[in-house]
Image (cartoon, grey):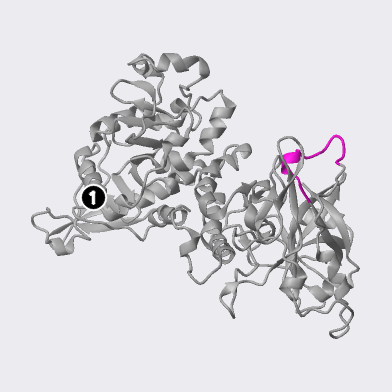
Amino acid sequence: MTRTSYIIYPVLSAAAWPPSCWTTARNTPSRTVDFKRIALWMGGCDKHKHWKSKQPGPVEMIPRFRLIDVMNMRLVCAPHIARYAALSYVWGKCKQFLLTQDRVEELETPHSLNKHAHELSKVITDALHSCRCLGIPYLWVDSLCIVQDDANAKHAQIARMDIIYSGAYVTFAAAGGNDADAGLQRVSAPMQTEQQQRILIDKQEYMVARSATCLVDKSPWRRRAWTFQELVLSRRIIFFTEQETILMCESEMLLESKLYARSEKASSLFETGRMMRYLSTPYDFVDANLTVIGAMVKDYKTSWLQLLNEYLGRDLSYDDDIEFAYTGILSAKEAHMGSYHHGLPVQILARALCWFSAHLKTRRPGFPSWSWSGWKFAQSATGPISNQIPPLDPLSSETYSLVVYVRLYGFDGMGHLKLLLGDRDEESGVEGFWGFDQHYPSAPTTEGNNGRNWALFDQFIPPQETPHVSLPEPCPVPRSQLLVFWASCAKFKVSFDEIPMTFDDGPFSTYKVDIDDVGSTRVFVDPGWRAQQPEKLECVAIVGDEISVHAILIQWKNGVAYRVGTVSPILKQEWLTREPERKLVVLG
């Protein structure tokens, strides 16, 4: 059952209400958007320190970046310093007038868009009108500013959504209706009915109104995957709802129905919008006592995973867009986290490969099994993705004593192997392989220390040479999605009986891994798949510490291994008793 939040406020004029009580003073919004009031809000925001500290994205870095000149109704190449609004909306199933290669020259002619006014969706015509009312000379909208039939140009601009939305003077969010023809609420179509009911209690008039932020939270716009990065990347947003208009920036929210208020900060909308601060806080400032790697890992465990989990909880119409729709946020984080490979940060790629989820639904075809993009997830209040490897050593508040056991390779555009993650480099922030002579300087090289054979640890040391790999023909997986690496592999008994868990909200179930420890090591897999597999399943050691191994569970098919789940932690002594062997793993 869907719940709707209602709020009761006293209704008094601004003159009758003392400024000290501005948190509750209300008035009734007009049937159409009050652009004069919104312009005053934005003028005040322009003078605030939080706005002055936010520099717009360098749009000049984007090749052929086009804007709509709202007065001359034509497309123009963006000037060096351009004040423009960006439009965030749900396309839906309505027919859109698109910029194509054969229309570019025509639409760059003055007033050319007037000739196609009847073909423009309502949300675009409303956004153009809003720009004129607010004195904003340019508008950016994806359907008209990106050449839709030029794949290279389209992908290049999708990759720079961080610059496009952070560079906008304001973002218009169409938080009403199911498609582009719903328009911006209350711009061209006045509010049809009075949304606020009034009641009289002890001679005081009160207004009963639905929470405006609740309206946004329940809208299709709020549930869409594509609009998440538009919400987070924007410096400020105007939400157009059927009830009233909301202006939100990083520090406050302003509502038309409030006489004085800067309120409703407790809403989930405001908290999600404030995720933009995660994109603008370099990891260098997370903790001055941390190394570059330590700060990066802490950033990954907090803001990076929080952003990803919020995104994965949203709706996506086309599976092929799973990485595209998140590219803007990855690009924004690149300055702090380095480059990415299919959505995982390369500089801590081994750690990131050990992601865990108890909310798996099924594989997403066309994407690698080792990335979050290769899976579909059930809805979860806490988010579908986590990483169980501790970010910090609790005793020293320093980077967790993690040893990477692999050197990871991928294929470049020419089909040649290239090193993605090599040796550890503290200065560059690369959490790669760290030799045992450095990490465990007192470790014996011969049998000793309670009978433990330390010579077996040699199999955790990956070769320095680039591996030679023979791929099956035809290869079942695009080369760009393959990871190639030498690794220690071992087989463990996994129970066939499901373990009941309170968080099992999808088709996958939990199974016990037969290890002589406290009994906490489990794996989360598809019951149908588990029933068809042998008793022993193969694990690949990815990272570890002084006593444990963190591994991924794999299945081999036609010479390619596929990630099935995460097995973590496994006592290192247990691993070594399973007669592990070093293998060249081709992970798809």
Name the amino acid, label 1. Answer: Lys
Q: Residue at x 71, y 41 (%)?
A: 365
Residue 252 horizontal side relative to residue 220, left or right: left
Q: Quadrant of residue 462?
A: bottom right
Residue 496 horizontal side relative to residue 550, left or right: right
Residue 470 lies within the magenta run: no
Mark 1 surroundings within 10 Å by alpha-carbon count, few (fewer than 14), some (14 through 19), many (20 or more):
few
Q: What secondary structure do most residues of the magenta stretch adopt?
A: loop
Labels in figure, total: 1
The x and y percentages for residue 418 are 73, 45
Q: Is residue 98 above or below residue 413?
A: above
Q: Which residue is drawn at 76% across and 53% down?
A: 563
Foreground pick, 140 / 30:
140
Q: In which quarter of the image is residue 554?
A: bottom right
Task: Please say whether residue 257 is visible from this viewpoint.
Answer: no
Foreground pick, 291 / 453:
291
Helix, strand or loop at label 1? It is helix
The x and y percentages for residue 103 are 47, 16
Q: Is residue 396 above or below residue 306?
A: below
Task: Please say whether residue 348 is visible from this viewpoint.
Answer: yes
Disc 1 target residue: 47
Q: Quadrant of residue 571?
A: bottom right
Residue 481 lies within the magenta run: yes
Looking at the image, the residue that sits furthest to the left is: 15
Q: What stretch is highlighted in magenta?
A: 471-484
The x and y percentages for residue 560 are 83, 46
Residue 480 horizontal side relative to residue 161, left or right: right
The x and y percentages for residue 26 are 20, 54
